[in-house]
Image: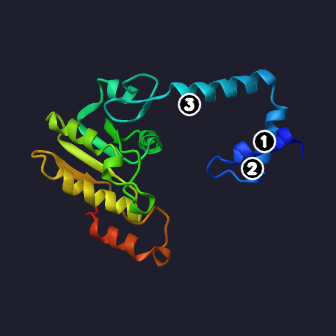
Amino acid sequence: MSQLLQDVVGEFSKLPGVGRRTALRLAMHLLKMEPWSVADMTRSIDRFRNEVKHCVHCNNLSDAEVCPVCADEERDRTTICVVEQVADVLSIENTRQYRGLYHVLGGVISPMQGIGPADLKIDLLCERLERGEVKEVILAISTSVEGETTLFYLMNRLRHFEGVRITAIARGIGFGDELEYVDELTITHALLNRREIE
């Protein structure tokens, strides 16, 4: 195999979820692309890596100091949805059901990986709550062990903000799941978060 091809495959393989076979397919696809198209792609990746910023308010990715969501005056400024990563913001935005603001923690508490509360953007969230505009904080954190630890920590930390309602997204059985294949923790959450049928 060409050393140039090996180098490209090696670089693609560093991406999460990309094995050597997929990396090889991607590299071979690059050879079929027009040179100007590959140049556009590499230029976009380079600009993204070097010019992207984190919003000073919510820690979301942005081209400017303030992200488009925080800059949008039409958004409900009394509600903040707290998520782990930027990808979670995109997932929630794609539903077109939420019109409030966001706060990106930048991960979850994970002692095994050496990530504690001080490594996350929790203090920035508290600063936002101290301003007194926020009426509800929605915790949209994953159901992993680390996610549950982070959720518990946040609930305790945010509890002292008077007049701020702290909620968490519903957890339970997914649409189309068969009950016999669902784990006990998920069933427990589903029972605790049950709602009345209208």
Q: Which residue does the image show at 46% across and 73% down from the upper left? A: 182
Q: Which residue is mark 1?
A: 7
Residue 109 is left or right of residue 91, and the answer is left
Where residue 103 sits in the image (x, y, percent)? 33, 40
- Specify which label sits upstream in the sequence, 2 or 3: 2
Residue 101: quarter of image: top left
Q: Are marks 1 and 2 in contact (CB under 8 Å)?
A: no
Q: Which residue is mark 3?
A: 49
Q: Is residue 35 above or below residue 136?
A: above
Q: Amino acid at mark 3?
A: Arg
Q: Amino acid at mark 1?
A: Asp
Which residue is the extreme one toward the front?
A: 114
Which residue is the extreme one toward the bottom?
A: 180
Where residue 37 sits in the image (x, y, percent)? 75, 24
* 120 or 193: nearer the viewer: 120
Q: Which residue is mark 2?
A: 22
* 6 or 165: nearer the viewer: 6
Q: Amino acid at mark 2?
A: Thr
As drawn, the label of residue 147 is: none
Looking at the rendered structure, the secondary structure element under dot 2 is helix
